[in-house]
Amino acid sequence: MDDNISQKTHSIDNSIRDKMALLDKYGDNFFSEKLTIITDFTPYVKYVQINLPARTPEHRIVFVRRGTKVLNVSFRDYKLKTGSLLLIPAGSVLINKEQSEDYNVHSVAFRIPKAESLRLVDFDVMSLQLSSANQRLVDNYISLMRQLACDDKADSDGIDFLIVSLLYILQEWNHEQNESVQPERQSRAAELSTRFVRMITSGGIPQREPAYYADKLGVTKGYLSQIVMNNSGKTVMEWINEKTLLEAKLLLSDTDKTLEDIAEDLHLNSASQFIKFFQKRDGETPNAYRKRAKKIAQT
């Protein structure tokens, strides 16, 4: 995992845990250092921050039981509805864009080393639309997880087993849903472009030099620029700048670092360069964004 991901960053789950401390009833929800299960999202809707990025340090299963939501995960929008399920890898940056008033979700955030060793969670998001029967099965799995999590005498290995078992099932469903859709084999150029985009979106703070990525992929800088533009519609620097801006917003909202320190983290030469970079792309100064983001987080 990228070192930047392991740094202390804003966690949606940790934020919800903090808010939960202010509530009188915990309902059907369970919180621990290893596992977070939210089986009724309704009490937390008011805490959802729209259009503010947040990185999730845990792997996450998001299963929509009711309503609709537009969730951006690492630069891609997912339009969720009843029966939608996302498996989101740790380190992903999430942005809540839209959410219906009746939105209700099963959310399971987990840290299980076995999931990585068995390759049950990939670098990319898994997106599924479940049948009614499969929705009931997921409901049952999460209900069992909650029951075990709330049982003081239960063995934590039992929860691990349930999560790993569910991940195997999700993989099978993903294979079945995509089996009928046989995409043409990617050309070498398209494959390299995809690998570049994955390097940018799944990592932490990006390097500023396109040559860095060209060297990693074993191609020239000019060739990388050509294939990325042809296959994604964006230049290499546009991808780098978008990711840099996203990481800047996380640092501004989640830390009290000075602008000079943030500029250094982002591989920019100075605070003034950072201010110009941020304002050109976001329309407001870094300090204005920080003030607004922290005000929203406190409401």
Image (cartoon, rainbow, N blue to C red):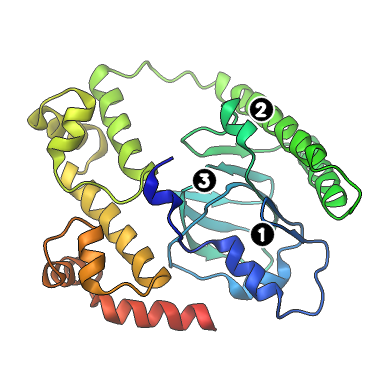
Amino acid at dot 3: Ala
Spot occupied by residue 181 in the image (x, y as percentages of width and height): 51, 22
Which quarter of the rendering shows the C terminus?
A: bottom right
**Residue 76 in view (yes/no):** no
For numbered disc 2, what is the local secondary structure? helix
Where residue 280 sits: x, y (%)?
Answer: 16, 68
The amino acid on which the numbered mark 2 sits, given as a three-letter code, is Trp
Residue underneath mark 2: 173
- Residue 286 screen position, x and y as percent: 26, 75
At which x and y percent is residue 179? 57, 19
Quarter of the view holding residue 221: top left
Give the image quarter of residue 170: top right
Disc 3 or disc 1, which is closer to the eye?
3
Q: Residue at x 34, y 71 (%)?
A: 252
If the image is split into quadrants, where does the N terminus sit?
top left
The disc, 1 or 2, on the residue closer to the chain's N-terminal end is 1
Kindly report the distance in space between the C-alpha atoms of the residues bearing marks 3 and 1.
25 Å
Dots 3, 1 in contact, CB < 8 A:
no
* Spatial CA span between label 2 and label 3: 21 Å
What residue is disc 1 on?
A: 67
Quarter of the view holding residue 216: top left
